[in-house]
Image (cartoon, grey):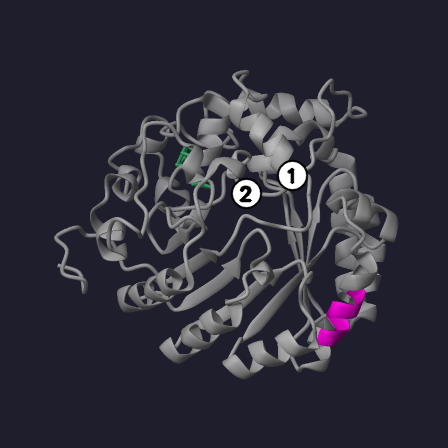
Amino acid sequence: MNAAGSANKANNPLWLLAELTYRCPLHCVYCSNPVDYARYGSELSTEEWLRVLREARALGCAQLGFSGGEPLLRDDLEVLVREAHALGYYTNLITSGVGLNEKRIAALKEGGLDHIQLSFQDSTRELNDFLSHTRTFDLKQRIARLIKAHGYPMVLNVVLHRQNIDHVETILEMAQALGAEYVELANTQYYGWAFVNRDHLLPSREQLERAEAVTNRFREKVGNDMRIYFVVPDYYAHRPKACMNGWGSVFLCVCPDGVVLPCHEARGLPGLSFPSVREASLQWIWYDSPGFNRYRGEGWMKEPCRTCPERVKDFGGCRCQAYLLTGDPANADPVCELSPHHHVVVEAVARAQRPAVTARPLLFRDDRNSRALSEATAPLPR
Ligand code: SF4
Ligand code: FES
């Protein structure tokens, strides 16, 4: 029996992602929120979130990310941070910066917030504001200085893709000018809105190699003053990532309406229903709910994963990517060269070597597009 007293052999969770709201002032074309977010129910109340924090901590979660949408749109963020700190979590605010000001950052600091991760869309005002469909570039610069002035390490996140990857050098120079200690250059993962916009966003191999070379040169120049993480896009890898470190292994995500998921994309998987914290305890959901047990361990695997020695390291890759690209979440992630569906990734990569030609316009994340996608009957591109 595990510590929680369930007969299930699952480990306890370590990492809680609290998606406080799907509301967001930005409209990023690669947002990882569900494309049909507009149809989901009401947000959890402050009391409900406080209960979630307590239950998750009792289960063993120690790392807590406050995310969204934009978590600063919740007026009770300070209350939640204070409680999380008292419970002993290490807390991280994942934000666009919109809504942060002197008063709020002072309150968050005083409440015990450990870490802030600020996103930029680009190093130029034009592209930053185009990709987010807002005028936020100058604001973000001010917020970065505010975060620094309050003694937080400067942690910047820039999602890379075909539209901005050629700006890596100026992105790194901007980060340096802002005094960044950590920069995450995270190539887009193709889920949610990014999947819909994939043909506009997937970089060419040449772009990717150039960006990696620029990053490596910059690393040599700045040494230990700035840690730079460059995350290669899955589509250019030979083997898949160990998504979430395995389904229902260490990570749980609580959505704005209280639905609990083993990863932030799982809501779109067919044949699974995930309970809400409004109807079940987090303990039951984690250990005993059918959704969390569906892809735990190895019993669900098909060939080639079932007998592949790599399965203990990558768990067959990502269930959500397998579903998006093959129609069956139990297939090997087609990023894997051993997958019989690997050709779908090869074809997408081949298209990315040419100038982007797609009949589909770039779709910004907003309520109107979300409602339209909720009603769409046509399958998404593979
Ligand atoms: Fe991983 Fe499956 Fe590919 Fe083996 S066949 S490397 S387990 S995805
Ligand atoms: Fe859902 Fe990878 S994002 S399993």
Give the CA separation, mark 2 to mark 1.
9 Å
Give me the residue at 79% from left, 24% from top: 354
Q: Which residues are magenta?
A: 141-146
Residue 306 lies, in percent from the top left, at: 31, 32
Seen in the picture, residue 329 relative to 5 is either above or below; the reply is: above
Please, what is the dominant secondary structure of the magenta stretch? helix
Picture quadrant of residue 222? bottom right
Are discs 2 and 1 less than 8 Å apart at CB? yes
The residue carrying mark 1 is: 365
From the viewer's side, name the closer residue of 128 and 259.
Answer: 259
Please state, as top left, top right, bottom left or bottom right, where the N terminus lies in the image. Answer: bottom left
The residue carrying mark 2 is: 33
Q: Secondary structure at mark 1?
A: loop
Confirm or reject: label 1 Cβ below 8 Å from ligand 2. no
The amino acid beneath tag 2 is: Asn
Magenta stretch holds residue 90: no
Give me the residue at 83% from left, 61% from top: 138
Q: Residues within 10 Å of mark 2 (few under 14, many from 20)?
A: some
- Determine whether, in the image, residue 5 is placed left or right of residue 94: left
Q: Residues within 10 Å of mark 1 (few under 14, many from 20)?
A: many
**Quadrant assignment for ligand 1:** top left
Determine which of the numbered discs, if any, sits on residue 55 in the image: none
- Determine whether, in the image, residue 348 is placed left or right of residue 330: right
The amino acid beneath tag 1 is: Arg
Residue 235 visible in the shown view? no
